[in-house]
Image: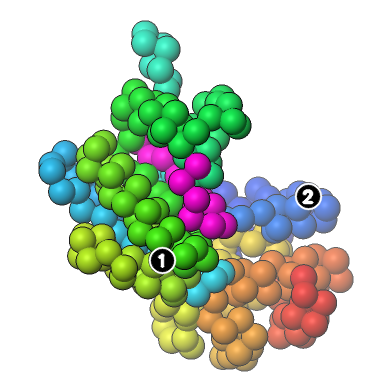
Amino acid sequence: MARVALNHLSIETRAKAQLDDKERIEFVKRDRWIDYPRATEAMNRLERLLATPKRERMPCMVMHGTSNIGKTLVVRKFQRTHPHLFDEDTGIEQRTVVAMQMPPTPDQKRFYAGLLFELGAPHSTSAGVAALERLARDLLRRITPRILIIDEIHHLLAGSYREQRAALNLLKFLANDLHLCLVLVGTADAPLALQSDTQMSSRFTPFELTPWSANDEFRSFLAAFERVIPLRRASDLAQKAIVEFLIAHSGGLTGDVARLINGGAELAILDKSEKITVEHLEHAAKANL
């Protein structure tokens, strides 16, 4: 391929733009992190929790927003920022951050089994709640995490009132027993899952990730996105027609915006135009790329 000017791309992405079409399409389909103010604020809040010294009542947060708004990407980015470390002297893995999903129903046994699975701990499926709890607490004391992140916390609402209270008591017990900061992540219903326990709801600071609107912040996000898509021509994603199309067809959800742009980029590579147009985005929307 003849060398072309790639000044519209980041330095790291310029090398990707020299790859063949198949490799570039594969790269386009991968998840990527793009900074924007609200996500950066979420990361900063998580970092402040992480820096909190141990005390009797640890601060906690509930991060919520519409499905596909980008909550899980924030969690994964935070985990990558604080990777696991292995202490060769003690033979124990140290984790600053432990993340798991709330089971589809607020069942204590399934919760502890899920937590042990994330910790990589073998356990008997026939073990009772008490045995699983002891094992989980023992491992967490050895691993010494500072933050426990529980995604899909709105699943609490799938249980009865009694099951919800039992699950909330479990979470409160872990936070108090291990001096952990809890970060609960879920849909817009996530804060509702805490309302049956006044102590829990008062401890958790809410943080909402909100949908995009057609403003300068969104245009800056699109300009940053364009710099990491390995197309050989500039698309000018921040132009009015593209901004309006993306807002209208994504509902302002970060995940859907990314899906449309990635689909448009794939089409632009395949038809050799090397730049995303509204027509590409329309095709991507219709084909659900």
Q: Is residue 34 left or right of residue 267?
A: left
Q: Is residue 237 left or right of residue 221?
A: right
Residue 264: quarter of image = bottom right
Residue 252 drawn at (x, y percent): 53, 81
- Over which residues does the magenta segment extend? 94-109
Residue 172 drawn at (x, y percent): 28, 50
| Above or below for 6 versus 110 | below
Q: Amino acid at mark 1?
A: Tyr
Furthest residue in direction right, as rendered? 271
Residue denoted by label 1: 161
Residue 241: quarter of image = bottom right
Q: Which mark is residue 233?
A: none
Q: Is residue 17 left or right of residue 271?
A: left
Q: Can the viewer see residue 167?
A: yes
Between 186 and 250, the residue placed more toward the observer is 186
Between 268 and 195, the residue placed more toward the observer is 195
Residue 55: quarter of image = top left
10 Å crowding of disc 1: few (<14), some (14-19), many (20+)? few
Q: Amino acid at mark 2?
A: Glu
Q: Nearer the viewer, mark 1 or mark 2?
A: 1
10 Å crowding of disc 2: few (<14), some (14-19), many (20+)? few
Going 75% across and 84% down the picture, which residue do you hit? Answer: 282
Residue denoted by label 2: 23
Residue 102 sits inside the magenta stretch: yes
Furthest residue in direction top, as rendered? 89
Residue 245 drawn at (x, y percent): 63, 88
Mark 1 vs mark 2, CA separation in Å: 51 Å
Tally of numbered tags: 2
Residue 103 sits inside the magenta stretch: yes
